[in-house]
Structures are given as C-alpha cells and as structure tokens.
Amino acid sequence: MLRQLTRLCVRYAERYIPNPYLYAVVLTFITVAAALIWTPSGLLKVVASWYDGIWNILAFAMQMALILVTGVTLADAPLVRGLLRRLASLPSRQAGAAITVFLAAAVGSWLNWGFGLVVGALVAREIAKRLRDVDFGFLVAAAYMGFMVWASGLSSSIALATATHGSALNIVEKVTGKTAGFGETIFTAYNLVPVVLLVILMPVALYFMGPEETDMKKVDPQVLMRQDEVAQEGTRARTFATVLEDSWLLTVLLVLMGVVYEWHTIAAKGFH
C-alpha cells in the first residue's frame, strides 16, 4: 500500500512539480496580486515595496549564504569525507541504506542545513558505489527527507532571525520589543520532541516505502567512480599564489577570531 502511494507521488512529482526557483517567482506574483486586491496600494507602490524589501534582508541573506558555504566546506573536509565513507560501508540492503542516508542527512541538517544537504548527497553516492541492488533515486529522496528537520535546527532561518536584534524579519522583536534566543526556540520541548519523533518514525516509513526489485532505477557504480576521478583530475602549479590559497594558517586565524568574538559575546550576554 505504502509503495503504491509512493509510486503515485513520484509520478505526480515528475509530471507536475517544477523547479523550486519557480515557486519563489510564482509566489511573488501571487503576493503582488493579493496586495493589489486587498490593500489600497497601487502597482508602483507594491513593486517599490518589493524592491526595497530585497535590500532590507541583506543581513539575513548573508547569514544563509554563510550557512551554505560553511556547511559545504565542512562536508568536503577530508576527515568528514572519511567518516562518511565509513558510514556508507555499513548498510548491506536497500532499506538499511536509505535509513543510513536519512539519519546522516537529518543529523547534518539539524546542525547546519548546508552541511546536511551535502552530507546526504555524499552518503547516497558512496552507498550507490558499494550496493548494486539499490534504487539511487530512493537514496536521494531519503537524503532530502533528512532535510525535514533543518528548520528546527541550529541554522533555522526563523530562529536566527528572531535572535538577531534589528533584523527586518524579526517579527517577535517588532511586536514585543525583545529578541528570542535559541533557549526560547530551538532548545525547547515543543521543538525538540517533533524532531526526535521524525528521526524515529521516518526510518520506519522508509523501510516500507522502498521500491521492489522490478521497480528499482539502479545506477552503475563505475559511472559514479569515473565522475569522482574526473573531479579529482588536474593539479595546479605550485606557486606563491597557490601556496597562499591552500594554506590552512590563514583560515585557522580567521576562525580563531570568530571563536574569540563568540566567546566574548556569550560571556558578556549569555545565549540571549
């Protein structure tokens, strides 16, 4: 029953769900239409408000960009990649593989949604290299399912906005005059309990959702391996510029500056 429902949803998604970017565009036009219908504003006023609003969220956009960049960088670190490969070597069947991908993506997404996106994809690829009797699309879907917990995690956009003084998106501060720290959002029972339930229940659903042998869309492991080899090809000439670019010292110093600032801020103000 669950497999049939999954098959129906996949067919619907393949036929009717467009690129996610189009959702943002369509919702923009819907909002414009709603503003014209239910507010006294004219078209030029609505368009001007839309344009001004883009520049009012630059700080928030920078936060999101940093989350993505740092998450991808962390997932690409040799130590993390090694751990992910070890994790990918554990499952021996499709159900276990999907559950492994989901859990890895869920934990990663709770810590950092950019990290979770990359972790899920990497684990799915590594497992697909090792297991032949597995639907690669199913593994990718499991990775995206792990992304379900990101809004309740440490990189939640709404939690970051409500914790940031002066943010254009901090509705809580605009209404109450106060910011809401993570202690009032992320680390509360009403936020953590649903996360735990998702992490427990989704693997059960994945166990019953997996496509049968006849419906599997498999990928040749050699194709994935060749893609990795192509990505690793090409070495740069060792020059002063490349040595400086590849140096870990500057990165460590920059990170230490951030750590010192965070330590000073937490020591002075706490987590609020």
Image (spheres, rainbow, N blue to C red):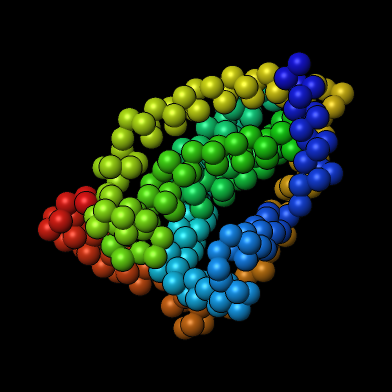
Q: What residue lies at 38% left-to-right and 35% top-to-bottom?
A: 191
Q: Quadrant of residue 211?
A: top right
79, above or below 50, in the image: above
Q: Position of residue 62 (x, y in %)?
A: 44, 67
Residue farthest along the top direction in this orientation: 1
52, above or below 228, in the image: below
Q: What residue lies at 57% left-to-right and 30% top-to-bottom?
A: 100
Q: Is residue 262 left or right of residue 37?
A: left
Residue farthest along the bottom direction in this orientation: 240
Residue farthest along the right direction in this orientation: 214
The answer to whether residue 165 is seen in the rendering is yes
101, above or below 203, in the image: below
Q: Is residue 184 left or right of residue 251?
A: left
Q: Is residue 166 left or right of residue 87?
A: left
Q: Position of residue 167 (x, y in %)?
A: 36, 64
Q: Position of residue 95 (x, y in %)?
A: 66, 23
73, above or below 123, in the image: below
The answer to whether residue 70 is seen in the rendering is no
Q: What residue lies at 44% left-to-right and 72% top-to-bottom?
A: 56
